[in-house]
Structures are given as C-alpha cells and as structure tokens.
Image (cartoon, helix red, strand yellow):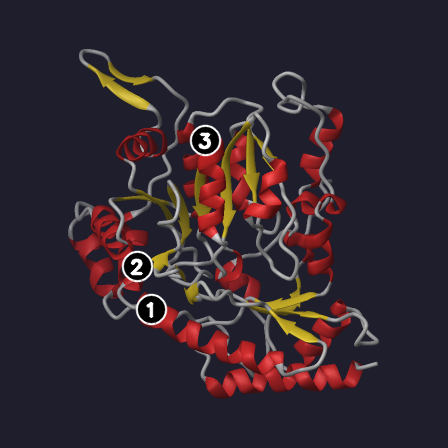
Amino acid sequence: MATRIERAKYGAEATAGLSGTLPNPYPRTMGPNCMKYLQEVVDSGLTSDMVTRFEQAFAREMGVKHCIATPGCNPALTVLAAAFGFEPGDEIIVSPVTDYGTVLGLLKENFIPVFPDTTPGTINFSAETIRPCITDRTRAILAVHMTGLVCDMDPINDLAKKHGLIVYEDVCQAVFSEYKGRLAGSLGLAAGFSFDTEKTMGSDVGGCVLTDDDPLEERLRFIGHSRGAQMQPNFGRLHTVPGYALRMTQSTAAISLAQLEIIRSNVAQRDRMIRLLTRLLADIPGVTPLPIPDYQNVYSSWMAGFTLDPKAFRCSSDVFAQQLARAGIPGVGTGRYYLLPASLTFLQDKARNRTYPFSMPPASHAYAYSAEACPTAKAFLETFIRWTTFCEKYEPEHCERAADLVRQVSDQNRV
C-alpha cells in the first residue's frame, strides 16, 4: 500500500481554517468587470480571444512591448529557460531565497543553478554576492524580488554587461513594485510573473513573460505556445524543437484582465500599509522589520516579515511565531524552506552522485548544495518570521494591531 505523503497546499486551501484578528486575503477582492469578461468568453463560444486582450493590456500597463501569457508562474519561468537556448551544464545564478518554481525550468533544461549568498540584513542577493559566483560557464542571472522588495538591479546589470550575461527577473511577488521609478519586470531582458490565486494580482491561476526583445518574444511563443511546431505545406506540423502548450486559458485571461483594472489601487494600499507596519515594528526592541531600500519607490508587498535578535529573547523563532499565531496573526510562521540549497534535497542528491547534468561533462566541476553554502541567508532565515496573509485589506488599525501583537509576544519572551 502506498504511503500517503503530506502534500503542500496552495491558495485558498492553504489558508482554510486560519483564524485571527487580522484580514485574510480570501475571499479575494475581484475586479468589478470580472463577470462581464467571463460572460463574454461564454457568449462568444470561446472565440473572444480574451488572452490577446489581456496580453496587450498588461504590456501597455507595464510599458513593455510584449506579454506572453501562460497558465502560471512556473510555466512562465519554464518557457523562459527553454527559450534562451543554453546548453546542458551551463550555469544560471539564482537568488538563494525563493521558491521551487523559480528554478523548475532551469532543472528541466539541465542547467545548473548557482546560489550566491544574500546581502547581510536582507532577503535578496546583490552584485557583491553574485560576483564571486561568475565562471566561464555562467550564462545568466535570475533576480528574484522576494516579498516584493526589488533587488538593486543597476549594479547587477552593470556586472552582467561586463561579463556578457543575460539578466532576467522573477517578479511573482513584486507585481508593480518600483525601482528608481521603473517597474519591476522591466529591469532586465525578460521577466516572469504570477497571477496565481494567492498572489497580489490574484486570478484563478495564471502568469506571463514580459520582454521588449522581438526575437525572444517570437521564440517564447514558438516554444511555449506552439509546442515547437512549424507548419510545412502538404505535411503539417514539424516539431523542430521540444516545446510546450503552456497557454493561458480564456477564463483566466478574463479574470486577470479584471484584476489588472484594480491592481494599482491594490498595490498603493499595500505600499502604504507595509511602510506603516515597518515603522511600527522598528520601534520594538529586538525586532527588525525587512528593510525597505531607499531606491524602492513602491513596495508591492506580498508578505510582511521581520527578524528577531536571538540574544533578546528566551524562545526560538518557531515558538515566537506559534505564539503570534495564537495571539491573532493568521498565516504567521518561519520560512526556512525558502533557502533552496537546503530545501531541494533531490538537487543535493544529484550533485553528490554526479547525476546528469552534474556529470563531467557537461558540468565543468563538482557541485554541492546545502544551507551552509549560503551562511548569511541561513542565519537570516533562522530568525525570520513572516505572514503571507498580508494584503490590500489592511488599514492603519490592522497595522497597529499587528505591531501590538508582536510587542506583546516580545515582552512575554524578552530576556
């Protein structure tokens, strides 16, 4: 009899049963035209081409030339990895603190992810931590704007240009965050987005790739939408490269289009509330909120978080988070699993056993993955507490309530 595994849960299922005194993202706030657009899809007999309407609207709102819609964030980043045309064993430098979907496409294409450490006191990497990881096999840098905080992209782009590397972005948690007046997702060659139900611009599922590059846009559609097939007269489809049918559905496009119409006010509210909450948390001794960089004009925060000074409290971060949950913050907890070199145990095994592509060739040397490979990130996540239920429903009284709860638990456990 097969052993039943406790599987990860996502979206509304993951938050079912949460209790507390603060807002929960579910039920999601839906754009007022949502039913209108869905009805158009039905009334048209599936001929409305709502996907193209959404692609054009999102590209226009983001100020880029091309939007290629996908069924989710994982497909968006997977199609991007396939479209670049790198070779097995080539190295992609990736933020070490992120989620599995960031690297799925790299692994499917047999590229080798390389994880620099994070910058002290932050959740993101930087040009300084990336630089030592660049080798003659490095082909690209994938920057993840974790929690909605944008990486310092100008130095990263300068470094990449010096070494002839592609820079692209994972914007799944940072839709409409702004860096020096520019939108996250417009700061590299391309970017992947998520519109999954729990994300800031939550649809039922959904995602997309953005780019200004015409040849890349054509290749993304060819590989990601057309399954790598081109038409030959008197024959039909020739599959000249391995491809996918990762196309957004008409219904998802309809919901996403409606959500796009309310996203700016959504993000503006998140930005105001996370900045207020950050100021309130900073006044609590031993508690350090995620720092908001000066270059970040808009913080499209998908989760709120802070670190603890372990010398200030008698309890662990896990116990602290459990007490916060009982006190009334829904969805609060630690996030050690975000450290991919530690959570991808199958990748550790492949590297240890020199399983392809870690065999030599195509790998150029032996690799190893562990939490200890990124000591700064590991130490940060040991004391990091966050809640993914932070949302646009927060008002000042909710920020004050959240800070009061953190203060109460702090005082209960203070050394």
First in sequence: mark 3 vs mark 1: 1
Q: Any mark on residue 145, and which?
A: none
Q: Is residue 35 above or below residue 53?
A: below
Label 1 environment density (alpha carbons within 10 Å; few <14, some 14–19, many ≥20): some
Residue 302: horizontal and vertical position, in percent? 49, 64
What is the distance, in whole Å, between disc 2 and disc 1 at their CAs?
8 Å
Pointer 2 and pointer 1: residues touching (CB < 8 Å)?
A: yes
Left or right, 339 with respect to 62, comes to right
Residue under pointer 1: 30
Residue at left offset 39%, top offset 44%? 188
Label 3 environment density (alpha carbons within 10 Å; few <14, some 14–19, many ≥20): few
Q: Any mark on residue 164, and which?
A: 3
Residue 175: horizontal and vertical position, in percent? 40, 58
Residue at left offset 59%, top offset 29%? 135
Q: In this view, does 140 lie above or below 290?
A: above
Q: Nearer the viewer, residue 374 or 353?
A: 374
Pointer 2 and pointer 3: residues touching (CB < 8 Å)?
A: no
Label 2 environment density (alpha carbons within 10 Å; few <14, some 14–19, many ≥20): many
First in sequence: mark 2 vs mark 3: 3
